[in-house]
Amino acid sequence: ILYRQHDNVEELDTFEHELILVIDTAKGLCVFTGCAHNGVLNIITTVQSVIPEKQIHCVYGGFHLIDGKKYVEVENTHELTSIANELTNLLPTAQFYTGHCTGEKAIDVLSQEMEGQLDSFYVGKEVII
């Protein structure tokens, strides 16, 4: 649970300020997220509900499944496996690219479960969409 400061009062952050960028390509939609604080599954289903006639080809962004810190609750292996299964069920042919805020443990588990559908990105990496 994260908080934000509003009028000098701490309150739960709703993350309503987060954006999704979707580019329509010849291969399908490419979805770009930030750290996906609202959940990458929620982002995907939102795009699918807004643009139901198009297939999602790729998803770029952090999944915000960062490795354990004292103040952050993290997903266990079972939950990560469940997320991987939901991603591949929602988008069986899509390619996913994720960044550092997904966390090393999560990337390892997701990579094993998603069998080639997940790759990491970093500054300077080139990907043709």
Image (tube, rainbow, N blue to C red):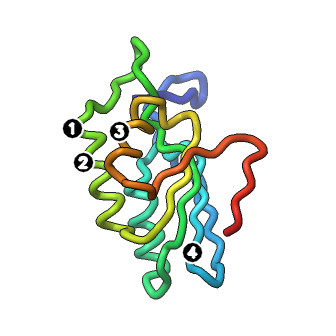
Q: Which mark is residue 29?
A: 4
Instruction: Of the two numbered discs 4 and 3 on the same chain, state the one appearing first in sequence.
Output: 4
> Which residue is label 2 attached to?
82
Using a 10 Å C-alpha cutoff, classify the residue at mark 4 as few (fewer than 14 neighbours), some (14 to 19) or many (20 or more): many
Using a 10 Å C-alpha cutoff, classify the residue at mark 1 as few (fewer than 14 neighbours), some (14 to 19) or many (20 or more): few
> Which residue is label 1 attached to?
78
Using a 10 Å C-alpha cutoff, classify the residue at mark 3 as few (fewer than 14 neighbours), some (14 to 19) or many (20 or more): some
Image coordinates for residue 102, horizontal then vertical, percent:
49, 37
The residue located at (56%, 79%) in the rendering is 28
Side of 15 relative to 27 (left or right): left
User: Relative to 23, does residue 40 appear above or below in the rendering?
Assistant: above
Kind of residue sitting beneath label 1: His
Instruction: Of the two numbered discs 2 and 3 on the same chain, state the one appearing first in sequence.
Output: 2
Kind of residue sitting beneath label 4: Leu
Q: Is 33 in front, or is 13? A: 33
User: Relative to 52, does residue 65 appear above or below in the rendering?
Assistant: above
Q: CA distance from mark 2 to mark 1?
A: 6 Å
> Which residue is label 3 attached to?
109
Kind of residue sitting beneath label 2: Ser
Using a 10 Å C-alpha cutoff, classify the residue at mark 2 as few (fewer than 14 neighbours), some (14 to 19) or many (20 or more): some
Q: Give the label, 1 or 4, closer to the camera.
A: 1
Q: CA distance from mark 4 to mark 3?
A: 26 Å
Asked whether the beta carbons under mark 4 and mark 3 sit within 8 Å of each other, the answer is: no
The residue located at (35%, 38%) in the rendering is 109
